[in-house]
Structures are given as C-alpha cells and as structure tokens.
Amino acid sequence: MVNQIVNRFKQLAIALFIIVGGFFFFSSCTTSIFDRKPMIFQSEEYVVYKLQEKKTSAMLAEMFLGDKKKSWVIEDANENAMFKKDEVIVIPLKEKNKGGLTDDGFQVVPILSYHSFADNCSSCLCAPAHVFDQQMKYLKDNGYRVITLGELYEFLKYRNSIPKRSVVISIDDGYRSVYNIAWPILKKYGFRASLFIYTDFIGVSKNSLTWDQLREMKKGGFEIGSHTMSHCDLTIQNKGEDTQAYMFRIEKELGKSKQIINKKLKQNTVFLAFPYGRYDHSILDMCKRLGYKIAVSVKRGSNPFFADPLALKRSQILKRDIKSFISRLKTFNKLSLE
Amino acid sequence: MKKKLAFIWIVILLIMISGCAEQFKKFSQKITEHRKENMLQSYLQAGKEYEDTGKLAEAYKQYKLAITVSPENREAARGIDRLEKELRKWAEKYYREGMKFHNQGKYHLARRKFLTALKFWPDHPRALKMLTPRKHVKYKKHIEHIVKPGESLSKIAMIYYGDYRKFGIIAEYNNIPDATLTHVGQKIIVPAIEGVPFLTEKQAIKTEEIKIPDSAVLDQEIKKAEKEEKEEPVDKEVKEELEKPVDEEVKEEVEEPVDEMKIYRSQGVEFFNKMKYREAIAEFNKVMNVNPDDATAIEYLAGSHFQCAVALFEKKNYLKAIKEFEVSLQYNKSCPTCLEYIKKSENTYMEIHYKRGIAHFAKEQLVEAIMEWKLVQAIDSNYKDVANNFKTAKILLKRLEEIKKSQEAK
C-alpha cells in the first residue's frame, strides 16, 4: 500500500517533470519565431536599425553616437520619423554635410542680439519679459535649435555640421536683468545664450551683472565674450590723438578686456562683439593677433559656413511683434546648386 | 516496467522537441534573411533611381546604406566605386569653372561653382580654400580712388601696384562681388600692400598713361565677358557650361604647352613678395632674355632694383645705392622717387666726405684730407667750398714738403 502510494508519487513527479521540461523547450522554440532578433546593421558610416519597439532619438544617440545631446543628428537624418516599432532608422556615424549644402542652397545661422530685459519697458534695446518668453517659445515649438558660439565656430571651420535650424542667442553689455529675467526664461526652454560684456560696467551698479553672477551663468552653460572695456566705437580716432596712441588704445580695449575676463572667469576668452557693431580692417587684424576666434557685428543677416568668423552678421531684435522676429530667423539661403 | 515506459516517453519527447526547435530556428532565420534581402533590394533600387535622375550624392548614400545592410553585396560596391569617381569628377569640373570666374573677377558666380563642387564632394580641399580665404592682411595705409571713365579694377591695380593681376586685392578690400562691374564715380579704397611699391596719387596720374599690352588684353576680355553676360541671363550661361562634355575640357588643359616664361615670372613675383629682391631680379632677367619687352618683368625689375637700392641707402652704401637707383630708372623712366634718392645719396655721400676732409685738415692730416675731398670732387667739383679747400690743402702740402726737403738738405 505504502509502496503503491510512493510509486504513484514517483509517476506523478516524472509526468510533472516531462510537462515542465517540455514547456521550457517549447517556449525556447516559440521565442525564436515570435521574439525576433533585432535587425541592426552597422558599417563605418551608417547604422541601419529596424526598431522593434518605440525608442527616442536620445536613446539611439546614446547607443550609437555615445552622447544623448547628439539626438539632433538622428532627427535631422530621419525627418518625419516617429521612432515607432518596425520603422527603419538611419544613423550617420560620420560628419557628412559639414556646410549644410543641398541642391537648393546652403545653411545659414542667424545670431540674435538682445540687450536688457524688464517686466515692462519702452526702449527698443529692452525686451519685455513676456515678449522674450513668446519668442523663445516660438523657437522651441518650431524646431529651432539654440547652439553656442563654440559650436558655430566648428561649423565656420568646416569641421562639424550643426543642427538644421540652428540659432545663436547673444546678449550684449551685461545688464543685471540677464540674470533676473532672461536666464529663467531661457532655462524654461532648455536654451543657452552667449553674453558679451564690457568690463568697465561689470559690478559697478545695481543694474549691472556681478562677476559672481557671470560665474554662475557660465556654470549653467552660458558663454562669456568681450564687448571691450569701455564700449567705445573702435573705429573712431579721438581729436588730438595721433595714430600710434589710437592704435595703442584700441589694443588695450581689445586685449585688456580679454585679460580681465580670462582672470575673473578662469577661461580663454575668444568671442568678441564690436561696440555699435563697428570695425575696420586694422581692427580685424588686431583681433586675430590677440587670439579672438569669433567677432560679431550688428550687420543684419545670417552666416553661412564660409563667412569670415571675425566679421559675423547679427540680427538685433528691436521690434516686439512676432512677425518681425520670425523674419530674422533665416536658416537657409536658397541658391540653385544643381 | 512503468519506469522504463516513462523513460522511453521522455526520450521520444526530447527528440521531438529538439527537432522542432531546430526547424523553428531555421524558419526564423529564413525570415530574417528575407527581410534583410528586402531592405537591401529597396536601397539598391533607390540608388539606381537616383542615379538615373542625376541625383548622384543621394544615389551614393543609398548604395552606402545597401552595403551597410549587406557588406558583401557586389552591386552596391560597384555602385559606390562608380559614383565616387563620378562625384569627384563633377566636383573637379565645378571647381575649374569656379576658378575661371574667379580669375575674371566674377566672385559671386565663382562662389556658386565652388559651393556646387563641395556639394558633390564635401572634401574638395581647393574649393573649400577658395570659399574661405579669410586673410587678414595688414595694410598700413590706403588711398581713396574715384573710378574714372574707361577705368577698371585691373587698370587701377596697374596704377597703384604696377600689376594688373592684383585687382583681386582691391575687390576683396572693397567687398566687390564682381570685379568687372565698377562704375564711373565709384569710390574705391586701394590698400598699400607690404613689400609692393605703392604709388602715391600724384604719380598715379602720370602712370595712368602707360599702356601695357597685357592689361589691355585682360580688360578686353573682361569687357567681352560683361557683354556676354548682359546678353544672356547667368543661369543660361551656367547651364550651357554644364552641358559641355567634361573630358574635352580636361584634355584642353592637359594639352596646353608649358609656358616657361610664366613659371619664371610667377617665381619672380613670389620672390618679390617674400622681399627676396636679388632672387627676383635673377628670375625676371630670365624672362627678359626671352622677351625684352615683357611688361610684368620690366615693372618688377624696376621695383626690385628700387628695393635693393633703398636697402643699400639705409646701409649707407651710397655709391652702390646710386647705381641701383640708376638701374631702376632704366626700367621705369618716370620714377621721381629714384631721382630724389639719387640726389639724396649723392649729397649725403659728399657731405660725409667733405666733413671728414675738414676734420683731417684741422688735425693737419693733409694727405687724408685731400683724399676725402677728391671723393667729393669726383661727384661734384663745385660742392660747397671743396674746390678752394682742395687747392689750399694742396698748396699747404707742397709748402710743407718743400720745408721738409730744405731741412733735410741742411
């Protein structure tokens, strides 16, 4: 009796073992049909990836380009892609179109120029907070990508490509309102700006930025460039000033402002904005000698990759209506290259 | 018994399952292969279509994607090879067209060609270089020039630099997109280039009359191009150029005979620009041996000898400086600066030796004094009081010698 019971148990155990084992085998069998291997092909220049599940461009950028921030490379290469299951995504691994050239023309980069900000103000050099917010929202909603001057420089040197709808935001002089008003708005949209400060102004009044504030913004990804020491028109020789004294003064405006910023912010200052946007050939020559890499004017327009980095165009945002703002956002220059 | 039965069951089941798994694996592999093949074919198909419609860069990309999916596919590899050659060829063609426009001073048309070259082949280094010159040449001074009737940028370059080919410098300095399109009354700023003699405005008016055949030819060419451009819209011209077979053009350039003079000339210009004037003179003399009327050589020889002369003048080697200035004058007869320098050299030379003579005279070193004044007289016997002094010194010397003699006799 006892034996019989034991035998039954043994039989049951064997049957159970067969069922469970068979189940495992079957499951391994079925997974190989239903759970397909991912289809990823990779060569030196491209990755071709058939998605099995929804992925974001940032995830793919991290996987294949080693940097989440390069998601724009994948987005630009797969326009209109939804990154859904079964979609084929092409990921370029090498810098392809460094100049942004197509059959219809070439890429250009607008540099927007602001000065001060306030909740309410009337001067055209001052942007009311709600207007600035609206403009930044427009950039975000319409697929514009804010890049830094450092990234722009790589484009101008024909070394790296940049996102298709790239824009640079620059703010001149060094008003306190950059810290109080503009920065929070920029942060809201994940944008960074490039500041041009004139060193005589920093920390001198309650309207000006302090070096500590500049350091803080620099940590937040802002770039700080020079706007000379005293914000004087570099092209004007004073009355009674001989040429040598004039050149000496200009060299000081450009060179010493650079030195001061270098020391205060522990950086190498290579960006410059000409006061009033004014410059001439000998000033450009001096900028180059002093180690500036990018210098901007206020000549309206956008910049192609072959623009002179020391005489870049820049569009001042003086009017407040969105229409004129949009008209400054030219990111492509049509010219048949077929 | 039952145990045995159970064992047999297990074995049979195992065999069945493993067999099935193999089957399924093979099946799924086939599906994957099929999908891969589909992708490959769609890329190849797209590549062909783009190639047929002339979108070469796009076609090239499709073949690259095809080879990414299937690295051993021969069709894709052949496509890549073929298109690479094709793209390079087109880039080179556009680059050459760009250079043609550039040399004519039609910078905006040239730029378009260079951009197209880069579109075909993004790593065309020469096209890129032409698009991004970015030389911030240091100019010490510049002169405003108002364009007069019949004047072109090349003529103005001839006036100020003595070299019509330097019109590009003026065009770049003034941001002129087309050097052939200047108008009378236009204000142009002409910068002085370091190492190139720069004529002042006063002299420029004189030299305007110089007629140099090369310059005239170039002007004519430019005018002709201008006319052609007016007659036909640019796009049509560009289109027509596109339709020309590429090979023919390449052949033409290969067959062009080597112009040795050209080489000497450009070598000379290079030396001149590097301020190696002696070397420049040697090169231009070679040109002159072949063609004694070569305008460029003459201009540069005048300039080179002038520069050498100035260097000698600064080293206070006045006699040699005078000789060099005289040679320079031979090449460029209207060189008032040369004449001024010669006069200055002579005067300085005479003044130095005149004073030295006086110093010797004061120390009663009559022989030395006479020697110095002789040098002065060799250039101008009427310089200051040199004639009288010379006479006095001679008389004194004679008397001294007589005294010496009489003492010896005693």
Image: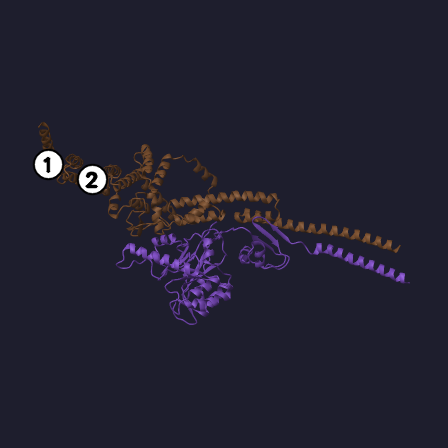
Chain colours: A purple, B brown
Q: Residue furthest right?
A: A1
Q: Residue furthest top?
A: B409
Marks 2 and 1 close (CB-CB < 8 Å) = no
- Residue A280: percent from left, percent from top: 34, 55
C-alpha distance separating marks 2 and 1? 22 Å
* Rendered image: mark on residue B126: none
**Residue B257 in the image: above or below residue A307:** above
Is residue A164 visible in the rendered image? The answer is yes
The amino acid marked with disc number 2 is Tyr
Chain ID of residue with mark 1 = B
The amino acid marked with disc number 1 is Thr
- Residue A58: percent from left, percent from top: 57, 59
Chain ID of residue with mark 2 = B
Is residue A239 rendered to the left or right of residue A309?
A: left
Mark in front: 2 vs 1: 1
Q: Quadrant of the C terminus of chain B?
A: top left
Q: Residue furthest front?
A: B410
